[in-house]
Image (spheres, grey):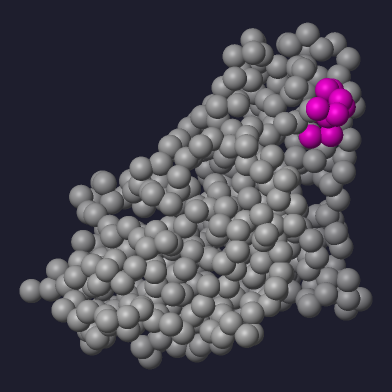
């Protein structure tokens, strides 16, 4: 009797998953169906279906496609990234008849490869003559987010495998060039077929050294020197495990104050306040070890976070991440929300036809989406920008809980009170830099909008005692 009914390749963008898939498909009896549960397409871009299941049918019931994968001739599987349909993750992880293959790559290499692909528009290479030259520009905050996402997902995989008594076949990016490893993987999967040579259709796109591929290499090395030393390519044996998003925390350089931001909240004015408090060196970002050192050297330190009314936060995120088509926009999610979830979003929010009525309709549809998304009923990730504030505060506890949870409506005097507790009698004035465009919440607010938000964020309203939104 076969040990496995199907398989999943846990990977990420630019880890070599296309090359691994091409070699898996070269074995008789194996078939890998691409990114079968990517929320933005099915299998591959411009593909309409997998095994007779269309994208719309998959979105309505992802388990239906999973059943077809199990039933297909031979041993079938798919690639799964951390931001793919979360509804399928638990079912796959709890199934010992699903073979787990974990593909990893040095996170710096995968980040640089991703940046070059973005710059050149070339995501695969089958002919070296068609190769496009390009360089990556390293951005420290973007890399920190990239690293945090990779590490968090790897820790989740490891924990779930341990809790269910399963093991996985780990493959590093460098192993993909080993015929013996590929044949060993086939043996582990229970396939009798063996390869005589690896697939040659895909070519390495950027074989040069990192120093030749990064335009600001010296800045990159300076930024990386402050990170803890660990090796994500050899998971699960890496340290430290960081569930809390410590690199996003902001510590004052002179005052013993630590700000734990809630994504989607009023972070910009708070950071302005901290910079005004300290001067040019304020609001440094740290690793866990750096933050522990800061705590030791700042006796009597106080930490705080700022909660925002769920409706005000949802509207700000809607305007900045979804409605917006410029910097900061979630372009892929925006497209999927329009095509798959029928959000009436304009191609350009500056279009004169997009008035307050249209804005309200689009925002109401977004609130409907949030209710389903936070309940795990959509194929799109629960992004930190719109995750419930209760969940985010729970995440703080993995490293440090805030001494004080403030409210945006009263944050000015609460910050002054907090500053006084650490000996600052005349704190700076809090600025207000955040304005929603093209319309503000007050322009579209009514009882129905409030009701939709309460349905989506019922736990935040309950846990933090939020009342109906009132304009400040």
Question: Where does the magenta region start and end?
Answer: 271-281
Identify the residue at horizontal 84%, vertical 47% (top origin): 434
In the picture as drawn, the residue positioned furthest to the left comes out as 1
**Above or below: residue 437 compared with residue 31:** above
Quadrant location of the C terminus in the rendered image = top right
**Above or below: residue 181 compared with residue 157:** below
Indicate whether residue 179 is drawn in magenta: no
Identify the residue at horizontal 78%, vertical 44% (top origin): 470
Where residue 87 sits: x, y (%)? 41, 64
311 vs 355, left or right, is: left
Residue 390 appears in the rendering = no
Q: In which image quadrant can residue 333 be found? A: bottom right
Observer-nearest of 106 and 204:
204
Identify the residue at horizontal 91%, vertical 76% (top origin): 352
Observer-nearest of 178 and 101:
178
419 vs 32, left or right, is: right
Where residue 3 sits: x, y (%)? 14, 69
Q: In which image quadrant can residue 278 be found? A: top right
Q: Is the magenta stretch mostly helix, strand or loop?
A: helix
Where residue 48 sits: x, y (%)? 50, 89
């Amino acid at each position: 009797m076969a040990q496995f009914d199907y398989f999943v390749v846990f990977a990420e963008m630019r880890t070599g998953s296309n090359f691994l898939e091409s070699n898996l498909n070269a074995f008789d009896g194996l078939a890998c169906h691409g990114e079968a549960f990517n929320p933005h397409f099915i299998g591959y871009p411009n593909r309409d279906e997998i095994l007779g299941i269309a994208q719309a049918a998959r979105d309505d019931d992802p388990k239906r496609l999973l059943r077809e994968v199990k039933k297909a001739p031979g041993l079938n599987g798919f690639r799964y990234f951390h931001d793919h349909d979360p509804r399928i993750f638990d079912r796959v992880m709890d199934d010992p008849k699903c073979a787990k293959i974990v593909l990893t790559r040095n996170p710096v290499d995968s980040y640089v490869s991703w940046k070059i692909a973005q710059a050149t528009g070339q995501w695969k290479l089958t002919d070296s003559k068609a190769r496009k030259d390009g360089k990556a520009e390293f951005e420290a905050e973007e890399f920190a987010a990239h690293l945090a996402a990779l590490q968090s997902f790897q820790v989740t995989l490891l924990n779930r495998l341990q809790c269910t008594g399963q093991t996985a076949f780990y493959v590093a990016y460098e192993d993909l060039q080993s015929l013996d490893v590929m044949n060993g993987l086939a043996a582990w999967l229970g396939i009798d077929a063996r390869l005589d040579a690896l697939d040659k259709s895909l070519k390495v796109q950027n074989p040069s050294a990192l120093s030749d591929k990064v335009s600001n290499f010296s800045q990159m090395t300076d930024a990386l020197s402050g990170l803890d030393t660990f090796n994500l390519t050899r998971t699960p044996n890496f340290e430290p495990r960081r569930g809390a998003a410590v690199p996003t925390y902001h510590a004052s350089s002179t005052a013993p104050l630590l700000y734990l931001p809630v994504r989607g909240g009023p972070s910009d004015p708070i950071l302005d306040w901290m910079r005004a408090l300290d001067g040019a060196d304020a609001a440094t970002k740290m690793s866990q070890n750096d933050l522990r050192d800061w705590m030791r050297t700042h006796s009597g330190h106080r930490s705080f976070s700022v909660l925002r009314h769920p409706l005000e936060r949802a509207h700000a995120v809607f305007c900045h991440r979804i409605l917006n088509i410029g910097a900061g926009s979630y372009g892929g999610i925006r497209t999927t929300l329009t095509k798959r979830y029928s959000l009436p979003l304009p191609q350009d929010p500056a279009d004169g036809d997009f008035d307050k009525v249209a804005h309200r309709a689009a925002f109401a549809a977004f609130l409907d989406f949030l209710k389903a998304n936070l309940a795990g009923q959509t194929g799109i990730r629960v992004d930190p920008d719109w995750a419930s504030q209760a969940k985010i505060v729970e995440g703080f506890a993995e490293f440090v809980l805030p001494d004080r949870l403030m409210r945006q409506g009263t944050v000015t005097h609460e910050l002054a009170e907090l500053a006084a507790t650490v000996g600052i009698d005349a704190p700076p004035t809090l600025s207000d830099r955040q304005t929603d465009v093209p319309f503000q919440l007050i322009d579209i607010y009514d009882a129905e909008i409030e009701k939709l938000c309460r349905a989506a964020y019922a736990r935040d309203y309950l846990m933090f005692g939020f009342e109906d939104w009132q304009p400040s």
